[in-house]
Amino acid sequence: MKPNVIVALLVGLVLGFVGGRVTTGPSSKSEVAKAAPNSPAAPAPGGRRPVDPTVFKVPIENSPVHGSADALVTVVEFSDYECPFCSRANVTIEKLQEKYGKDLRVVMKQNPLSFHPRAKPAAIAAMAAGEQGKYWEYHAKLFANQKKLDDASLEQYAKDLGLNMDKWKAELANPKFQDIITRDQALASQLGASGTPAFFINGRFLSGAQPIANFEALIDEEKAKAEALVKSGTPRGQVYAAIIAKGAERAAPKAAPQAPAAAVRKVEIPADSPSFGPATAKVTLVEWSDFECPFCSRVGPTLAQIKESYPKDVRVVFRHQPLPFHPNAKLAAEASHAAHEQGKFWEYHDKLFANQKALDRASLEKYAQELGLDVSKFKAALDSGKFKAKVEADMAAGSALGANGTPTFFINGREFVGAQPFANFKRVIDEEIGKADKLLAAGTRPEELYAKLNAENVANAPKAAAPGAPAEPPVQKVDVGNAPVKGAQNAPVTIVAFSDFECPFCSRVVPTLKALEDQYGAKIKVAFKNQPLPFHANAKPAAAAALAAHEQGKFWEYHDKLFANQRALDRASLEKYAQELGLNMDKFKAALDSGKFNAQIDADMAQASSLGATGTPTFFINGRTLVGAQPVASFKRVIDEELKKAGPTVADSK
């Protein structure tokens, strides 16, 4: 969503349709293209809005389900209990359930929007009721009483349904419900369902509280396809799985297709990352991948062909980006490093991709045994979590570069997204070999080749986007809200930072911001928003601690302590820093124990997602996006342009 997120979203909802966008980063574009051809959907009869033929892979496990497992049509709904359009659509869904009976089942996903303060508590209350088998009864209560979602009302609905109140109240604090909401919202974003309500009918996207006839038309179409599958031998209980098996895992970008190597980044090569090919190769291909991602496994034969075709000229470096909706991917990544420690990374890598549906702990150990690894050493590595930090470092580095989807490659720093065919890789590789040959002929030493090629590609990257496209994302309205702010209140330039106290790139940019403050003085102010990434275990408690320090007027001092001590963010350390700053410790500890700042942190995270800020750090300078730990010059360019807009008097003042 672009300018003025909330207004745009509300307008979209009023129209019964919200255009989606992917906020989790690039996708396997070539594979999505195969699943979703560019040809437009055929015009729908009767003036009905055409429905995209794309089938998405929408998992339904561990979500509330209403209806038979043998249903021919599955409707997955992303909803918000405080959204009036969701309430309207709920009436439609109930009518559809009555009409289609056992042929229709409904699966509920939670997407409480950030500007609906009671939507998340209501969702948690419903899931707590679900622990006692009353999710759908409670769900109905919420939509029937949408204007009464305060704590007392939520409790009354639980009593009305005869729930065990002690158990229900205890479940409200269960962190697994927040995890479910985070998972569902990440999935919604991944699928392009940025507003509520959003529906996937046998994997096909229908957005908004549309007329019942639109639902019926799509359900009838999908029901006919499902009946054909059953006639051809597919058991009814396996119809949904069969339909979505080859579905797209993410929404295709809304913009016109970009050239695969449009973005160029400075990409570092960690010494401990697995690689094949010589370190002095003319081309270095860095891959961010996920062992549970089907598109990553599809690119395996292409990489093997690259290895065979360019044995001396290409080096391939493997880095990890296990996606949050792949439950076994992160442990598999750690296991691959345990194999790497014993000199068998690539053999283990191949085992994992050959067995993507069996990545549980027992299977990971079995593959280690089959490869003749020291299994005791392998198990000890997994038990100790010794490679967890390595995997998380790769994830953070990938996010900072924009590699949030898999597979993503950087060929001498040139971004190349998706499981594309060998010919596409070959084109870019051959171009880079030509550049390398010229540098070598001019005297560049082979061991310096990658750094020089990467730097030259970054320096020579186009500074503007394709004709007709904006040079940078559109300016967005970014509300500061109750975020900690440093600088003059009436400063002409506001920098809103979305950051994570455990992210190494966020700490790297701290001196940059200090340098800007020193240079621009009262011309800029900086607001801090929290975006603790899910793979940084201590980032969210650290964010809460920083806000507890803010409550006592010491946010920025505490902020500096956290970034100076990123490897020590456990509870004891957080209390130690508070003590060192002379905070009231009883008040500080009580704030952490009560979770009083969780809602503010969650709101910051939701705002970041809605603005497209998927990695950290991300900055909005008067609403203009700047991503990553960029140099001072990159910030200065935008700040100076904004000061110039404010007028020559402001720009020239000290």
Image: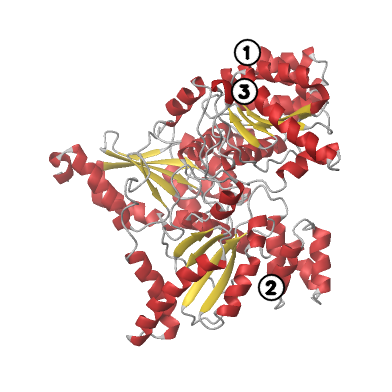
Relative to 476, 564 lies left or right: right
The residue drawn where x is 35% and y is 87% is 441
Q: CA distance from mark 3 to mark 1?
A: 30 Å
Amino acid at pointer 3: Asn
User: Which residue, given by chain and number where applicable, does mark 3 sit on?
Assistant: 214
Which of the two marks, 1 or 2, is nearer to us in this view?
Answer: 2
Front of the two marks 3 and 1:
3
Q: Which residue appears at 77% of the width and 70% of the height?
A: 378
Q: Amino acid at mark 2?
A: Phe
Would you identify the image quadrant in which residue 6 lies?
top left
SS for tag 1? loop
On residue 148, which mark appears?
Answer: 1
Q: Amino acid at mark 1?
A: Lys
**Left or right for 334, reference 629:** right
Mark closer to the chain start, 3 or 2:
3
| Residue 325 left/right relative to 453 | right
In the depicted view, which residue is nearer to us: 287 or 561? 287
Query: Which residue does the numbered mark 2 point to in the structure image?
Result: 345
Circle nearer the N terminus (3, 1): 1
**Which image quadrant is residue 153 in?**
top right
Would you say residue 82 is visible in this rendering?
A: no
